[in-house]
Image (cartoon, rainbow, N blue to C red):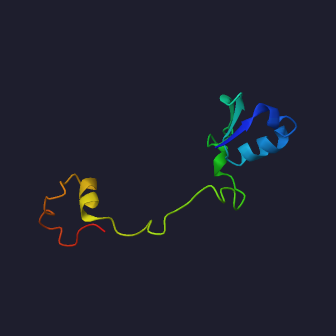
Amino acid sequence: MDRIPLSEADGHLAELVDRASRGEEIVFTRDGVPAARLVPVEDATGRDASHRERKLGLAKGRIWIADDFDAPLPDDLLKAFYGLEPDEPWPDGWEDKPA
């Protein structure tokens, strides 16, 4: 989501609409306070316009993924996903605990 002061948006409406039609959400601010939001409209299929082909690199520099994003979770955190306490043993039949 990009925040743009109304004073800077003047003269760039066509570009901003193009960005919104590609799935971006743009918030216009007035004196630093959000005043309006530009979002894609639904197309004739009822799906939002964000399913359309998007320009490669649109979020470059905005998204960061940790190097260990896909590393195995620590046992206590993994157990929490399954409703188990950290010190509780894995139930019988879970010899191969979830990865």
Residue at the location (78% across, 45% down)? Answer: 18
Residue at the location (78% across, 42% down)? Answer: 16
Judged left or right of residue 62, residue 18 is right
Residue 19: give x, y in percent of width and height.
Answer: 74, 46
Residue 65: give x, y in percent of width and height.
Answer: 52, 62
* Total number of numbered discs in the rendering: 0
Out of 17 and 59, give the one closest to the viewer.
59
Please tell me in which quadrant of the rendered image residue 37 appears.
top right
Extreme-right residue of the structure: 11
Residue 78: give x, y in percent of width and height.
Answer: 28, 60
Residue at the location (88% across, 37% down)? Answer: 11
Judged left or right of residue 94, residue 28 is right
From the viewer's perspective, is residue 74 above or below residue 51?
below
From the viewer's perspective, is residue 81 above or below residue 4?
below
Out of 27 and 19, give the one closest to the viewer.
27
Extreme-bottom residue of the structure: 96
Judged left or right of residue 76, residue 60 is right
Q: Quadrant of the C terminus?
A: bottom left
Residue 85: give x, y in percent of width and height.
Answer: 17, 54
From the viewer's perspective, is residue 15 above or below residue 67?
above
Judged left or right of residue 69, residue 46 is right
Out of 21 and 10, give the one closest to the viewer.
10
Residue at the location (78% across, 41% down)? Answer: 17
Q: Quadrant of the N terminus?
A: top right
